[in-house]
Amino acid sequence: QQFLERYGWIQPKDWNNLKYEDVSVPVDEDPAPQDSYVISEGLSQPNSIGSKERDTDPTLSPQYNDALRSFQKANGIQVTGRLDEETKLAMSKPRCGFPDNISGQNAANNESLSNTTSLNDTESSTNNSSTETPPIRRKRFLSRLIQHAQKKRSTQLLGDNPGLGFSKKTLKWRLMKEGYSAQLEEDNQRSALALAFRMWSEVIPLQFEEDTVSPLSEIDIKLGFGKGTHLGCSQAFDGPGKEIAHAWRLGNIHFDDDEHFTVHSSEGLNLLKVAVHEIGHTLGLSHILRPGSVMQPNYTPRDSNFELDWQDRKAIQSIYGVCEGPFKTVFDWVWKSDQTYRFNTYFFRSDRYWMYENRYNRTRYGDPNFITIGWPGVPNSNIDAYVHIFASNRDAQYFFKGTQVWRFDPQRNMAYTEDSYGNRYPKLISDEFPGVSGPVDTAFYDLRTNLIYFFKGNDVTAFSVGRNQIERGYPKRIIDVFPAVTSGDHPIGNLDAVYFSYAHRATFFIKDKFYWKVVGNGDLKYNPTLPYNGLLSQDRVVNKWFDICDVHSSTVFTS
Ligand SMILES: [Ca+2]
Ligand SMILES: [Ca+2]
Ligand SMILES: [Zn+2]
Ligand SMILES: [Zn+2]
């Protein structure tokens, strides 16, 4: 009963009021994860729930029976409505202290949940314990929460849910001095937490900064380890085993220091994974009873390639929205390996870049990185354009910034200062491409015609690589060379990037948060009346390239 009350199972299960868009609601046939970690310390302790069974079982009220049934259903164990061995085992697993059975309606009756949901972001910095919050205010907040959830469902809004999440874009966190764990090196605790925050900022437009100096009132999320009654918290921990941590929505995070937390180890409870889960609560997520979700209440051992999966990403993005451009340069990098050509897609903005993994629909883990680290010798920020001349008799890669051009040496993975012909770089664009002067907005090499198109303002210049000169009649207006397929739907000028994607076998014009696909052979087969080099209707960049998110400067990996 204690377990069921504490973790919110007493009220009927009602997922309807807080369902996240695009996230499948847990279904009964979902099996519980087979690999749930059973911590040895936990099982060696007297099982207080089990020892009470004889006293309480015969008198279980229908309410407790129902709660047990829904717990059993959700955990994929046999639904008996009785506290049998299997159920006891499921309840004794290491788990999070945040209540499972969250819905807007039953939340109002659930004291511990009311505590967790009644904080908003202005209170959270000054008021750790919400017990001071008047009940009326709580109810109002909850009804607002429900309204938001319902509004979201009906209008399919992405993001724009101020009642559900933080409204700031950069959040400050601190591992409190009095809250360090005695088990781990301080640096290891802090770096595990920094990495956990970073994992969320890799999928939503929110950044996290560790702040060890500002006044406490400026810290958005305070974290700490504690045992039993801890850190002035209203919910005491339970000694070794079972509850391992808990978090307050838009508030603080506590770890039970009676648990065996580890970093860089397969033993014990992985602090990174537990922290990612608890931060999920602080950001506004409830438990998600889906195997593989980082938000499932029971701890499962960390996989070596632990990351937020597609549905977890969608869940948090339903609160905070998705990361959008603009990107200043986008290109496919083609390289040769064992006589086979391969490509990788890169997005550049300011002083950093991302590698985009098309087959996984996300950026490479650990990105963004600084341009200076990945592309030594090219300008360290605000690159205008990239061109790869990829002809039978010429294979050369260039970066453009301002009036200058740099040539990149893929063999040595750095910019040339001098190539094998004695050409020194960087040089004026007009010295390498006669008749073309910088700065350019963007440029791309057209394999089919052996032309480089240079874009600037509303104009485009076609440069013949074979004849080493500008094509006759250029510059022309972009809209005349690349006409709109749908009248009025055209970027006109001031493009950010134009690039040929090997993954999509298509050329894209990118400007701000939108892209236009250039009519290709496939499109012409389908509709022969489409104009050559026409631009198809615009769409949002985020509908084609997902989760290209920035992280706080302090958490960009530099080695
Ligand atoms: Ca515990
Ligand atoms: Ca550009
Ligand atoms: Zn949890
Ligand atoms: Zn606590």
Image (cartoon, rainbow, N blue to C red):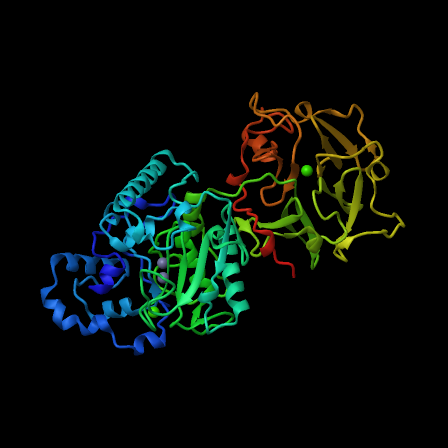
Q: Does residue 288 appear left or right of residue 4 in this picture?
A: right
> Foreground: 324 or 485?
324
534 up-or-down from 392: above or below? above
Residue 139 place in picture, x, y as percent: 27, 43
Q: Position of residue 37 (x, y in %)?
A: 37, 70
- Side of 498 relative to 59 (left or right): right
159 in relation to 97, above or below: above
Q: Taking the image as four quarters, which one is ligand 2 found in?
A: top right
* Residue furthest left as drawn: 59
Residue 303 appearing in the image: no
Q: Nearer the viewer, residue 153 or 459?
A: 153
Q: Residue furthest bottom?
A: 44
Name the quarter where the C terminus is drawn. bottom right
In this rendered view, identify the residue nearer to me: 419 or 494: 494
Image point (60%, 31%), residue name: 519
Which quadrant of the rendered structure holds the N terminus? bottom left
Farthest right residue? 422
